Image: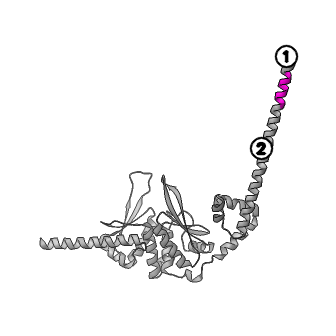
Amino acid sequence: MDCKGRFERKIGTRILQNYVFTLYKYKELLEKRRKKARSEKLASVIISKFLSGFSTRRIAKEVRFSSWTIRRLLRNKLGQKYHEIVRERVRVNILPEEAKNQSYELGYVLGVLVGDGHLRQDCMILKTTDREFANVFYCFLKRWSGLRSRIREYDRPIKGKIRHVFDVSLFSADTARFIQMLGIPYGNKLRTWRVPNLVLSGNHEIKRGFLAGFFDSEATVRLTYDINCYSINNAGLVQISLLLSSFGIPHRVSSYTPKNRKWSTFHVLTIKWQHASGFADKINFQLPRKRKRLERLIEHNRKGNVNLIRDLTNF
């Protein structure tokens, strides 16, 4: 009797386990169906927003997904239609013909792109932690192209710290192709950038604009000494030197090899404090902060020269 009871309990336990397992799988199946329904509903919302004119970046911000995920979903769901819509939207931002003429604004935009900017096949971007620089470039970009530019703010980790970043962009494949044809490469250009031939052989204004944009990006002003531009691209810095020479601004280019062999040799273009006033008169900065520092450098050195002359006279 005991064996029969144990056998019945064992059978009952197995039946109960099978029932629980079946119930669990059924709930799991229901949850998968709910998730699939929610994902299909979300996909339909994303597709409807995209077809109504929303950009993938704006949709990603609203649904809290990455732009890459949104674009992949749209490509999978819409197929060739997605690419047709994107091409049609890109054609809207056609660069006006007058913007292709030589001008100070075009020179400034090219100078910033050679410095801190970035060129992609569908847009040009400046990422910076400097609000002032972002606003100045945004104004120049809008004034030069006449197209709708964007400025975006967000926080991101940089070298272990959370920094506030400003993202200035102009989405236009036509504009990007024009800039690339001038000689500025797509993607990483740290070692490959060169001064465009349009600037080297251009008029006075486009050269001034290019130098102003480049120095706004790359130059530092030391109040007690000089103006410096650092780069690992010696060939590009030599071309900057040629542009400065065309304005009659004395300067020098030096090279330094770090003790650590893993580091690249870097090159420095230096404008000494004696010639800072000539740079201010002929080129100058567009960033108010750097312009004020340059004025303080000139004033500091002018007072120093006056005191030196006074001391020599008294001696």
Q: Is residue 307 left or right of residue 28?
A: left
Quick one: label 1, few (<14), some, or many (20+) residues within 10 Å? few
Dominant SS of magenta comes to helix
Q: Nearer the viewer, residue 292 or 105?
A: 292
Query: On the rendered image, what quadrant is the C terminus found in?
Result: bottom left
Label 1 sits on residue: 2
Residue shown at the point (84%, 28%) measured from the top left: 12
Residue shown at the point (39%, 75%) measured from the top left: 284
Query: On the rendered image, what quadrant is the N terminus found in?
Result: top right
> Looking at the rendered structure, which numbered label has been put on residue 28?
2
Residue shown at the point (77%, 54%) measured from the top left: 37
Q: Nearer the viewer, residue 202 or 43?
A: 43
- Give the mark, 1 or 2, whose residue is nearer the N terminus: 1
For the image shown, how many numbered marks are present on the structure? 2
Q: Give the magenta part as a residue range.
A: 7-15
Residue 12 within the magenta-colored segment of the rendering: yes
Please, what secondary structure does the residue beneath circle 1 have?
Answer: helix
